């Protein structure tokens, strides 16, 4: 990465090579989570990529060149694949950095984690949507999920794995943020990723935050930066918030008044202040400029290629066309990398080149992958210090 003051960019051209390739190895999962994008099922789909086809996919990923994209095996629950350990070994033999994203089921035990580490996994992500069993298990709809997830988190850290913790931001869970932050701070994680819900799959009726609430949450997450390694998923305007907050801090301007932050921001901030964390303990890590089709690609369990797992439009099939060709040349991907095609406020916004909005949420709201992101409440041109922003972007 090449850091700037407020937003990072990748060293290589994201139009040529993705930073992340996410492979949905299966949709099978023993959980029945209320927000599930994949609407996971109890049994595996017979159309899934088999072991050899998955190996060929990894060869295609390796062919992007060095540095190779990070290859993440997810689901459903990737532990439903009996060949998971073998797939990890094959990926490592191809020179890939392989990570896994399992569900908090009974299969997520110490023995399974040890096998994965021996196969070559050095990083994993786990989902935690509440700071207590009552909240998290209610979200996942299977008792014991919270306990298994927290235990797996501790075991993975003990084994030396890097752990990312993912938490869904919805009207149902947003008030859990301070307690989740405290748990992440206490147990330790490489990253805490706040997933800004995209209304699709089972998550359609879960309760999306309002645009004002999203502004409050993202500014609260920005405040946590010196204490917790926080990032967002499908919350691309966090990069805009990072730029705004940097400018306001340099000018000595009160961000609460300048950005019109509301009651949710005050509630979350006051509850966190009560923890008495004291002086900052880490350097704030700026968010990275990656978006659907721009540094990021998703391959489904049946081999179809998508700009994101939350944008259900296919650009091709890896059984037919190599992934690098689809990523570099398909009309869907090249179009998403063209900021001039953005619609509505996203198209008029001066932050478009580092934000671009959630293309998944724009699609969910309008049926157009270039559509306006309804979770962003920013009115283009309203930030009073555009020259300061431009200076940061060109530093």
Image (cartoon, rainbow, N blue to C red):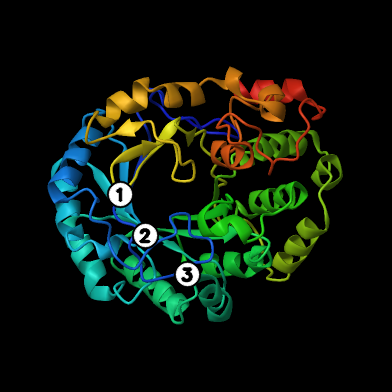
Numbered disc in front, either 1 or 3: 1
Q: Which residue is label 3 attached to?
A: 187
Q: Nearer the viewer, residue 136 or 320?
A: 320
Badges 1 and 2: C-beta atoms under 8 Å apart? yes
Badges 1 and 3: C-beta atoms under 8 Å apart? no
Task: Name the residue furthest front.
Answer: 46
Q: Residue at x 61, y 37 (%)?
A: 362
Q: Earlier in the sequence, mark 3 or mark 2?
A: 2
Residue 47 screen position, x and y as percent: 24, 50
Question: Does 93 sit left or right of 264 as displayed?
Answer: left
SS at circle 3: helix
Residue 152 screen position, x and y as percent: 36, 72
Q: Residue at x 44, y 81 (%)?
A: 144
Separation (CA) of disc 1 from disc 3: 33 Å
Separation (CA) of disc 1 from disc 2: 9 Å
Task: State whether residue 317 is above or below residue 350.
Answer: below
Q: Nearer the viewer, residue 233 or 199?
A: 199
Q: Which residue is label 1 attached to?
A: 301
Q: Earlier in the sequence, mark 1 or mark 2?
A: 2
Q: Earlier in the sequence, mark 1 or mark 3?
A: 3
Q: Which residue is label 2 attached to?
A: 76
Instruction: Judge the density around disc 3: few (<14), some (14-19), many (≥20) Cα neighbours within 10 Å.
Output: few
Question: Does 80 sit left or right of 231 as displayed?
Answer: left
């Amino acid at each position: 990465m090449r850091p700037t003051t407020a937003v990072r960019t990748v060293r290589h051209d994201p139009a040529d090579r993705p930073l992340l390739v996410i492979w949905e190895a299966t949709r099978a999962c023993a959980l029945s989570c209320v927000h599930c994008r994949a609407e996971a099922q109890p049994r595996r789909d017979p159309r899934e990529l088999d072991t050899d086809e998955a190996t060929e996919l990894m060869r295609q990923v390796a062919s992007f060149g060095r540095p190779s994209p990070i290859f993440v095996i997810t689901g459903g629950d990737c532990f439903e694949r009996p060949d998971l350990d073998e797939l990890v070994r094959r990926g490592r033999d191809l020179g890939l950095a392989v990570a896994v994203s399992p569900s908090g089921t009974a299969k997520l035990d110490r023995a399974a984690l040890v096998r994965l580490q021996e196969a070559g996994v050095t990083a994993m992500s786990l989902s935690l949507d509440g700071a207590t069993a009552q909240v998290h298990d209610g979200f996942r709809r299977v008792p014991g999920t919270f306990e298994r997830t927290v235990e797996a988190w501790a075991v993975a850290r003990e084994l030396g794995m890097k752990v990312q913790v993912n938490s869904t931001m919805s009207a149902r869970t947003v008030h859990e943020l301070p307690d989740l932050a405290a748990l992440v701070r206490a147990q330790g994680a490489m990253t805490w990723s706040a997933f800004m819900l995209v209304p699709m799959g089972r998550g359609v009726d879960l309760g999306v935050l309002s645009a004002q609430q999203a502004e409050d949450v993202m500014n609260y997450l920005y405040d946590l930066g010196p204490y917790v390694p926080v990032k967002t998923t499908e919350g691309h305007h966090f990069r805009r918030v990072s730029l705004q907050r940097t400018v306001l801090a340099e000018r000595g301007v009160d961000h609460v008044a300048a950005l019109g932050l509301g009651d949710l921001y005050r509630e979350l901030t006051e509850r966190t202040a009560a923890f008495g964390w004291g002086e900052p303990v880490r350097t704030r890590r700026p968010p990275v400029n990656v978006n659907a089709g721009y540094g990021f690609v998703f391959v489904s369990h049946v081999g179809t290629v998508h700009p994101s797992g939350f944008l259900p439009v296919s650009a091709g099939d890896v059984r037919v066309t190599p992934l690098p060709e689809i990523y570099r040349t398909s009309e869907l991907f090249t179009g998403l990398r063209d900021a001039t095609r953005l619609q509505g406020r996203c198209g008029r916004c001066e932050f478009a080149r580092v934000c671009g909005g959630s293309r998944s949420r724009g699609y969910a709201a309008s049926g157009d992958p270039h559509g306006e992101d309804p979770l962003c409440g920013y009115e283009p041109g309203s930030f009073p210090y555009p020259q300061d922003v431009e200076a940061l972007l060109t530093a």
